[in-house]
Every structure is written in structure tokens, then in C-alpha cells.
Amino acid sequence: MITNLPNDPQAEKAFLSLLFARPQFVQKVSGLIFPKDFYKRENQIIYASMQRIAASNELPLDMVGVTRELLARNELKQAGGNINITSIASMSMDLPVTLNDFATCKKYAEIILDCSRRREAIKSFEEATGLAVRGDDIGNILQSLNDTLENVNRGTTVNGIGDTLSEWNTWYEETQLLGDCPGIHTGITELDNMTGGWQNGNLIVLGARPSMGKSALALNFACAACNDGKNVAVFSLEMTRREIISRITAAEGDIDFEHTNIPALITHEERQRIKAVFEKIGAWGLFLDDSPNMPLSQIATKARRLKYAGKLDLVIIDHLNLIGTDAKKENRTNEIADITKRMKGLAKELNVPVICLCQLSRGVENRNEKKPQLADLRESGTIEQDADMVLLLYRDGYYTKDASDKSAELIIAKQRGGRTGTVNLVFTGDRQVFVDDVLQGVMTNARREDIPQ
């Protein structure tokens, strides 16, 4: 049995002291953290008292009110007495009044909650170990452990409308100054205009036939985010990290893609540009993983580590049809359904956008009209169901074999929070770059200006 369980007494005291200084925060954090999440028993009792006072509004929410409330319940001694309450409350007197107090309060709450979840996980493992030693069915033990850990990871809190409204107002105040694109910039102006950028918690599926350019477009998205100072994790189950760097170098350095794959072709001038590109991307928060046949559980574990380290703003997975499985289902369709459901859960859990590439079915090739549709998503209709946004990439030149035709279309086939439509692009294959169709952009902006305000 582990005796030195995870805890942070300083974070607990700092959190409570902030609540004494800003009693209006108590109701805001009530749906985030509970008394049981505190490690020290006296802190559990003090926080529970604060919650009761905030709910009843019969006593002042300060050290006098908490002392009187606990005295009436005969719990003052268990809370450490007057000395402990006064000590915690007095810490708040040294705190400067700032606009970021609630953000600081939430950070302390997150530290406390993280320790609490770790203690619950340890308890679950110890219980599972005891059952295994006792000889219980291993399948039942593992399933029970998995269910318990999922609850620990996701939490069991149900927020009241007051908490939700407060959260919405906070989001509104933080994003209204960001203009038309409150999310992560895609690097394509018209796509930003239509979607507001990549939104936290969203699952975005990018579908296309093989060799249409979906990997290149996804890396363009990654580069745009990195250039904006975001941290991006790319899980490539198809390309190696060297191939990814070759594509990024071609795109960012305006270098022939063939040359970045065949070093003998690189000119002296291109070598200088490659050096400049490497200096730039070397400072990016870009993380590449090319492990083959990774199950989603492994991808999720690696993404969580980056998120907990404060180094994750966007996840890109290339691609859905190559993701491995932890347990065999009846068929691949059911496996894909399980994967997409869990990917959406991961996006919400980590509160980052997850972009997953997907190969479209061969049915496209058998139609006169080659432009893709939602029904062309391979192996599972649940991809459409679980995704917040579905983007379908199409290039007419792919079928006509016309090398001079650089036109491309990015079809927004589904957008849970906005309109559908088509973004016209230009694809420069020898540079692996998709950019806005400038003429189309001018026309679209003109139409937007004509809309009555």
C-alpha cells in the first residue's frame, strides 16, 4: 500500500485563502471541485462550510462566518480551530487585487483536482491488485479498472446553469477581442472566415481519395498553427518523420518537394533556404510521432502527457484507417465506430481540436461526378455522426491528369456550429502547399460587404 499519496497542501491553502478574499468565486468553483478532492481533512471541512454558506447566504462568507458555521455544527475542532482558519484567511490579505484572480483560483483548483484523481487512480490499482491476488476473473478486473479510470480521468461533475453561464461569459470576454477567428488559425483565410478556425474540443475529419493531397493540407494546417505560436502534435501512421520534415521544408522554404526527398538535387541556394527553414521550425512547438499501427489508447496517452506539460494546442492524426485497435471487434466498421467515438471524447477531455485524416471509399471512382460526399467516408457512418466538422478535399486535375490545373476545392460537408460550403484553393504540388484562391476570396469578401448590418 502506498502511504505517501499525491497532495499539495500549499495549493489547498492558497485556494481556500483566495475564496476568503473573493467569496463570489465559491459558487463558480463548486461544480469544479468538491470537498473530497482535498487531501487534508481540515481543508475538506472548511471548503464544505464555504459551500453551505454560499448556498444559504445566511452568514458572511469570511473567517467569522465559517468559524460560526462550523462551531454550530460542532466541527470547528476538526477544521483545526480558530487558529487554522485565521491562518488561511490571513494569507489572502497579502494578495493584490487583479483581474486574473479567478484564473489563478482555477489553477489552484486544477492542482488539487489533479492530486485527487491520482489518489483515486492509485486506489483503483490497489483494489484491482487485491482482486487479482484473490483470483477473481481477470477480464472483469480489467474492465472494472478501465471503467473506473475513465471516470477518474473525465470526472463526474454535472454543472448547474449558473456555472455554465459564467463559463460562457468568460469564454465570450476572452474571445470577442480575437475578431472573426477566435479559434486556431487554419492558414486559409476563407476557411477561417467560414469556421472561425479550429475550435477547442472539436473533432475535425479531413477526407479525400489517396494522393489527393490531404496529408500536405494537414501539414499546412500544422505549420500555420506553429507559426502562430501554438503547440501541435502530429501522429503519422503512414509517413516517417523524415518525410514529414521534407514536406514541411518544401512548403516553408519554397523549395521543390522532389529536391527535399533527393539530396543530390538540392542546389546551393536551396541549401541556404533549408538552413533558414530549420532555424525557424526548430523553435516551433511541433511534436512528431511516426509509430506504426498505434492504437488510439497510445495516441491518447502521448497527447495527455503533452497537454499536462502545457505543450498541446492541436492534434493531427494521419490517418483514421491505419489506427490500430486495443481489442478486436466483430468487424472493422465497429472498430472505426469505437475509434471515432473515443477520438471525440479525447478532443473534449483535452479541450483541443483533433484533426483526423480519413481515406474516402472507391465508390467515388465509379461515379461521373467525382466530387466527394459524406457517404464516401470509408467503413463507418459514425464518422459523420461523431465529427463536429467534415472537410472533403477535391482536385479536378487529379482525374483529368492536367498538370497545369492547380485548382482545388475544400468542401465543408458538415459543420456543427456553422454553415457548409466550398472553399476554393490553389495547390502547388511541387511545394506541397495549398493557398487561398485569391480571386474567389475577393468575390466572397465583396458578397460579405453587401450583407446589411
Image: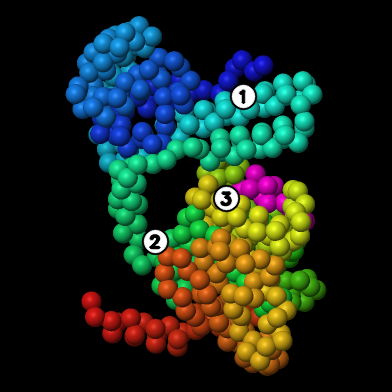
Q: Is residue 56 magenta?
A: no
The secondary element bearing badge 2 is classed as loop
Residue 159 sits in quarter: top left
Q: Amino acid at mark 2?
A: Pro
Q: Which mark is residue 346?
A: 3
Whether residue 220 is visible: no
Give the percent coordinates (x, y) of residue 396.
63, 88
Q: Tell me the residue at 57%/25% (across/down).
A: 119
Q: Amino acid at mark 1?
A: Lys
Task: Classify 10 Å Cα crowding around label 2: few (below 14), some (14-19), many (20 and above).
Answer: some
Measure the alpha-carbon separation of dots 1 and 2: 41 Å
Q: Which residue is mark 1?
A: 123
Q: Who is closer to the viewer here, 118 or 291?
A: 118
The secondary element bearing badge 1 is classed as helix
Q: Earlier in the sequence, mark 2 or mark 3?
A: 2
Measure the alpha-carbon separation of dots 1 and 3: 24 Å
Write the start and end of the magenta stretch as one range: 291-303
Q: Which residue is mark 2?
A: 182
> In this picture, is 93 found above or below 372?
above
